[in-house]
Image (spheres, rainbow, N blue to C red):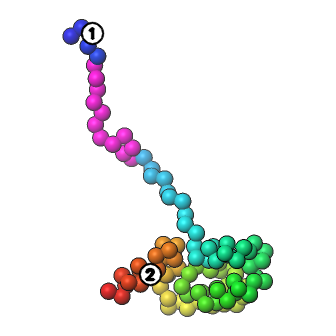
Amino acid sequence: MIGSVLLTHKHGNPNWGKAVPFPPALPTAFELRVRQLQLTVEEYTSSVELYNWCHQNKNRFYVPEWLLSEWHITVDPNISAVVSTTVADRHRHTLAHFLAS
């Protein structure tokens, strides 16, 4: 066949075996509270509002260990670590419903 163009058909997924990029991390409940209070890291330890939030939520959400230590706040070691993950922070009502059923 003179003058014909040889077409090659590619099969399969061209991205097969390539690493999938991680999605951006979502802020934790602690980070959202800090933003809401408009605090800098230097202001964390002097904020009464942040202290109260951390004390009330120490077993529900992630709180930086250095801050817990600074305020001598202890967490209950018998609470599941699942509760303090970012996904659980964002979807804790869904998790609670799932675990209750």
- Residue 68 included in the magenta stretch of the image: no
Q: Is residue 69 visible?
A: no
Question: In front here: 65 or 26?
Answer: 26
Extreme residue in the left direction: 1
Q: Quadrant of the C terminus?
A: bottom left
| Quadrant of residue 33 within the rendered picture | bottom right
Name the residue carrying label 1: 3
- Rendered view: 41 above or below 22: below
At numbered mark 2, what does the secondary structure look like: helix, strand or loop? helix
User: Magenta stretch mostly in which secondary structure?
Assistant: loop
Q: Position of residue 89 (x, y in %)?
A: 51, 77
Q: Position of residue 99 (x, y in %)?
A: 37, 84
At numbered mark 1, what does the secondary structure look like: helix, strand or loop? loop
Question: In front here: 34 or 63?
Answer: 34
Extreme residue in the top direction: 2
Within 10 Å of the Cα at label 1, are there few (<14), some (14-19), or many (20+) other Cα atoms?
few
Disc 2 from disc 1: Cα separation:
66 Å
| Quadrant of residue 36 within the rendered picture | bottom right
Relative side of 34 to 24, left or right = right
Relative side of 31 to 39, left or right = left
Q: Position of residue 22 (x, y in %)?
A: 49, 57
Q: Which numbered disc, 2 or 1, marks the residue closer to the eye?
A: 2
- Residue 11 included in the magenta stretch of the image: yes
Tag 2: residue type? Answer: His
Which stretch did the figure color magenta? 6-17
Tag 1: residue type? Answer: Gly
Q: Position of residue 46 (x, y in %)?
A: 78, 83
Q: Is residue 3 visible?
A: yes
Residue at the location (54% across, 85% down)?
Answer: 60
| Label at residue 93 | 2
